[in-house]
Image (cartoon, rainbow, N blue to C red):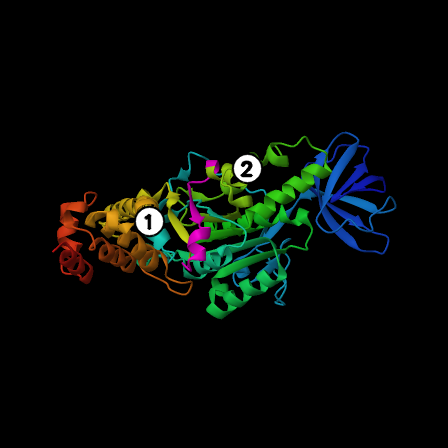
Amino acid sequence: MKEYKTITEVSGPLVFVETDEPVGYDEIVEIETGDGETRRGQVLESTSDHVAVQVFESTQGIDRECSVRFLGETMKMPVTEELLGRVLDGTGRPIDGGPDIVPDERQDIVGKAINPVSREYPREFIQTGISAIDGMNTLVRGQKLPLFSASGLPHNDLALQIARQAEVPEEDEGEDSEFAVVFAAMGITAEEANEFMDDFERTGALERSVVFLNLADDPAVERTITPRLALTTAEYLAFEKGYHVLTIMTDMTNYCEALREIGAAREEVPGRRGYPGYMYTDLAGLYERAGRIEGVEGSITQIPILTMPSDDDTHPIPDLTGYITEGQIYVDRDLNSQGTRPPIYVLPSLSRLMDEGIGEGLTREDHGDVSDQLYAAYAEGEDLRDLVNIVGREALSERDNKYLDFADRFESEFVDQGYDTDRTIEETLSIGWDLLSMLPEEELNRIDEEFIETYYDAGSDATIEAAEADD
């Protein structure tokens, strides 16, 4: 342990200290103020004679007379299975009034990179209970699938719905596997935090969850370690205790804003729109901690949530996130204004690994064909909506009007289900077939004939109405 009283400058969340020997990068620092208060920090930059320390708490009251101690170790997260059911702040300290945490071990929050040779391809279905995700953009174990939202949209409600409903179907669970949720909230308001906790406690989801809460009035620097603490906890539960862990991180935009604030304090040369040039690498260091390891029962699946500034998906945060992750789920403003809950817009949404989580033995053998046909029919209905604005419905053919009706029913019956409805994959696919029964059989050109014979209901109310209209 080395101790100095050589602070030369305080700039925003950074404290610059003069040293007589090199100090390790990421080393933990304790700063003792004049009133006896101890604040923690981390070495952000180190040279032979100067060190930049980012302080997790406020730098107010820190001056040249303060004592700076370098502890000789990096930041570690105390981990134990007893963390399930606990609520922690953004630095990993309990804030739920429960007993002190007695850790099994302390793990470095940077984590260990998964050896590419040992990394297993993401596979197998995770049921969220949300038709627009399960049916059209399936989430699989080990995947990283972000939610692209925007300011004022109900992404928090959607996150809570996923957190309480997500499960591994019983037939897929191993004997020693359990499901857990690690929920990391960054830069949220106190009102949002109360809503999160009320929902977790009301639904009982807290029992299988570990919650990290970093509030908007907490120091921005704290936001940079919150997701790392959460992911370290997830890695312990997954790779040492055999849990299938779903990690939800909201809001990644607040995290990136903290990176920009720190970069400005360090007087770094900014990259796109003022964000640090290394933001891609930084985000990749978080997102790539999802996955599965050969021979290990557990897995880590990530759902990062970000709000796109100005609803712009070419903004650096969603743009870089899209490069790293395996798809995206769009939360749409127009659907939200129509009252659709959750307002997931399936056309630009994508799960690149969906094929690895569906099919016979995973969901159902017709899942892929139903998803393709629903997508094609909804896309055609959306195109026709633009045409209707020009020529009116009377100028369209009977076939085109069926697709318009299909698009309306798809949004009102398939996508819109509320935040309290938990649908099984069987229920989702049944609704899909009911909608497809609106269309003539010859229009189902993306579905195998065997599935049409088994599931297509030519006698459904929708089909009868369509036949009567043709007559």
Counting from the top left corner in percent of width and height, residue 55 is at: 73, 46
- Labels 1 and 2: the sequence-earlier one: 1
For the N terminus, the image quarter is top right
* Front position in the image: 467 or 266: 467
Counting from the top left corner in percent of width and height, residue 362 is at: 28, 51
Q: Residue at x 37, y 57 (%)?
A: 130
Q: Residue at x 85, y 42 (%)?
A: 5
- Residue extent of the magenta highlight: 323-341
> Which mark, residue 238?
none
| 332 part of magenta stretch | yes
Can residue 363 be seen by looking at this rendering?
A: no
Counting from the top left corner in percent of width and height, residue 147 is at: 46, 48
Q: Is residue 361 left or right of residue 89?
A: left
Q: What residue is disc 2 on?
A: 316
Which quadrant would residue 325 be assigned to in this image? top left
Q: Residue at x 17, y 56 (%)?
A: 466
| 229 part of magenta stretch | no
C-beta proximity under 8 Å, tags 1 and 2: no
> Which mark, residue 136?
1
- Look at the numbered disc 1 and give the secondary structure of its residue: loop
Q: Residue at x 85, y 39 (%)?
A: 6
Residue type, numbered disc 1: Met
Which quadrant would residue 317 be assigned to in this image? top right
* Front position in the image: 67 or 404: 404
- Residues packed near mark 1 inside 10 Å, few (<14), some (14 to 19) or many (20 plus): many
Can residue 221 be seen by looking at this rendering?
A: yes
